[in-house]
Structures are given as C-alpha cells and as structure tokens.
Amino acid sequence: MSESDDGGTGVMALRSFETNRWTGVAGVTLLLLGAGVFTREAALVLAGAVGVGYAAFARSGDAPVAELSVRRSIADRSPSPGDEVDVAVTVTNVGDGTLADLRLVDGVPDALEVTDGPARMATALRPGASVSFRYTVRVVRGEHVWDDVRAVTRDPSGGTERETQLTRRTTLRCTPELDVGADLPLRGLTTQFHGRVPTDVGGSGVEFYATREYRRGDPLRRIDWNRRARTGELATLELREERSANVVIVVDAREEAYLASDPEATNAVEQSVEAASQLFRALLDGGDRVGIAAMAPTDCWLAPHAGSEHEARARELLATHPALAPTPSEGVFYPSLWLRRLRRRLPNDAQIILLSPMCDRYAARSAKQLDAHGHLVTVLSPDVTAEGTAGRRIARFERTERLRDLRGRGIRVVEWREDELPSAVAGANQRWHR
C-alpha cells in the first residue's frame, strides 16, 4: 500500500444524545409495580423491581468520547479511469478508556463507487489497540478528497451515543490521457496560421482552386503543363489554401445536463468530457489552436492555444476542474451572464464545438446565438434519452425537435450513444462531404 494521507488526524467530538433504546421501560416498570401492589401479586412486584434495575442501568453512564487516530492509505496514487483501487483504513485508540461499542464509517467521495467490502465496521477497542478495514473503489477522472471518518460510540447500555469526526485528508487524482478518437472536420474560416481548415483563398495547398497567368518566379511544379501543351500559354495553378482555426470546446456541465439513460449508464457530462478530450487532441494534432470552456456555475476557461504545455494544462483541466466534476457543481448558474462572459473571451474568428445532451431549450438557444454572432457552431450531443414512460417519450421528441431546428439553421449536429462517438463522427463526415 502507498501512503496518501495529507497531515495528521483532527478530532471533533459532538455532544451525546439519547438513542431511545430503552424508551417505555420506566412506564412499564411503574405499571407492573402498581399492578402488583393493587393485586398483591409478588410476581408482578418482582418483575417491576427488575424493570427498575434496567431503567437504572440505562441511565448509568454517558457515551465516551472517541480519542482515536486514523491512517488511510490507497494502493495506487495515479490510477486510470475505471481502475479499481484498494483503500485501507487503520484506527488506533489513543485514549485511556475501552470503547465497548465503536462504529466507524469512512467518508468515501461521492463520485467513487465502492465495489468490494463496506467502507465501515463495528468493533470494540481497548486502549492502545488498533483495528483495520479495507474496501475497493472504482475510480473516475478528477480529484477526489475523502471526507471525515465518522466514529460513533455508545455507553454499555446503548442508551446514549456520541459522534466524533476524525479528519484525515486524503486526496486521489485521476488524470486520463488525451486520446485521439474522433477527428471532427471544422467549418471553413481564415486565420494567419497554416493548418487544415479549407478557405476560399488561393495559395499553396493540396486542392485545386483556380488558374492564373504565369508570373516570373512561380514554382515549376505549379505550372499547368496541360494548358501549355494545348495552347502554348503559360499558366499557374492556384491551390486551395488551408489555415488553422481557433476552436473552443464548450461542455454543458449544468446540473440539468447530468442525465443518463439508466442508473448504470454514464451520464451526459461524463460522456461529453471524454469526447472533449478526444477532440482536443485531434484538433491540436491537426494544427489548430484549441481552448476549453464549461457551461456551468463554476467559471472554467482555457484560451485557445497550441503546444505541449497547453496540452498538459488542458489535460489537467478536463480531469480535475470543479466545473467538470463527475457530480454537479454547487452554486447558481446565471445563463445571460455566462453567455456574455464567453463572448467577451472568444477570439473573433473562433469556432465553437458545443457538447450538450440538448436536454432543454437553453443549450439550443445558446448555440443559435453564438452562431448568429459569427462563431461557427458544431453541436455534438450525447443521446441519453430512453423509452418507456410517456414522459421519457416526450423528452425524446422535444430533443429531436431541438436538433432538427439547429440543423435547419445550418448548424452541424452529431448525435451519439455511449462509446459510439468515432463511428458517429465518421458517418457525419460522409454526409457533410456529399
């Protein structure tokens, strides 16, 4: 096991409270004693006396304070998404008293699924003694911080209990590689950088554009020799020039976008972040300048750029930024403010690739507004709709109509189901080039 603790153990004991385990004992005792005296039955009086003993036992003490130290370790400090990682928790009684009834619950991060062994245990612990328990979690991308270990102690009768929070900070980071999996063709525009986006400007390229009169100094390889053979005139071939694009990948990470087709499926935000990592690497390898933004309550922005350092920053952002967490961000999303801020940040010639399940009108409206302001928009929409109930069928119909409206306005749209993005992009490429 490798240590992953950050700092020592912080202890905060809360006040004790009644468990109501012995509720009613005093009433039953008085009832038995009264009935025994009234009927002069010794057995009833004796039973009442026993009840008095239980009632006294229930109020004989208070739940002890858990004076404990905690050590948590994980087996792999740099796992990949989907890996299963073992976690071990060791608790030591550093106090002077025996803890006769001790319950321990580890604060597993919400985004991690426990796949083997419960992250809790119940035991008794003598002074100086230690106890350990292990469990396994399935890792997803991001930075995951464990919450406090909760220790619950009870007095010997179980009538009162006290909770103690044991703070032991443990952090696990899962940063996936940026894989090339989907090469999305961009819409034509111009910048000063050479790249792969076709333009309507003649120059040096790979695709025929036009012919013009020969000028002294033109390369011999660009002379139209067929025309020279037919007419005797010299002419120079102009090829369609290709230039790089400024591209911003926008991930819809609002709370409304954390949808899945079923409880076991990957939600739309997770699918979008995975797609963003593939697109980022493919666009960067194609010579484009790529940035990242999130449609979320938490501000997230990486300006378009290129290079290995920029790629490393993008990888870190996609893996650990709070706006792109596997669970919804806290805070309030202000639609108008977000859109104005994004437009101020965008380069004038930037294209937008919007990753969104299109679960409501706002995402579609934002795509249309950005496209209307001169930023060519391509929408990639993970399909997390499902069949079954009338509500699900209505939601699917409404999403289909939103996408049809976007296509009708000239915005490119790619739909895909989980793990089908490369094939969906390939099919869209064929349609767009017909």
Image: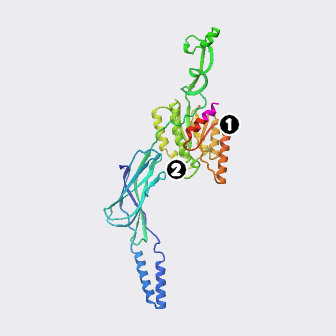
- Element at badge 2? loop
Q: In the image, is residue 16 part of the stretch drawn in magenta?
A: no
Q: CA distance from mark 2 to mark 1?
A: 33 Å
* Residue linked to disc 2: 327
Q: Horizontally, is 148 left or right of 305 in the view?
A: left
* Residue 383 image offset from top left, x and y in percent: 60, 45
- Element at badge 1? loop
Would you call the spot at circle 2 few (<14 residues within 10 Å), some (14-19), or many (20 or more)? some
Q: Is residue 292 visible?
A: yes
Which residue is located at x 49 percent, y 41 percent? 317
* Amino acid identity at mark 1: Arg
* Residue linked to disc 1: 409
Q: Is residue 374 visible?
A: no
Look at the image and give the residue range highlighted in magenta. Answer: 428-434
Would you call the spot at circle 1 few (<14 residues within 10 Å), some (14-19), or many (20 or more)? few
* Residue 65 image offset from top left, x and y in percent: 38, 65
Which scheme is used to colour this image of the protein? rainbow
* Amino acid identity at mark 2: Thr
Which residue is located at x 52 percent, y 34 percent? 282
Q: Is residue 59 or residue 267 the one in the foreground?
A: 267
* Residue 194 image offset from top left, x and y in percent: 54, 25
Q: Horizontally, is 183 left or right of 84 in the view?
A: right
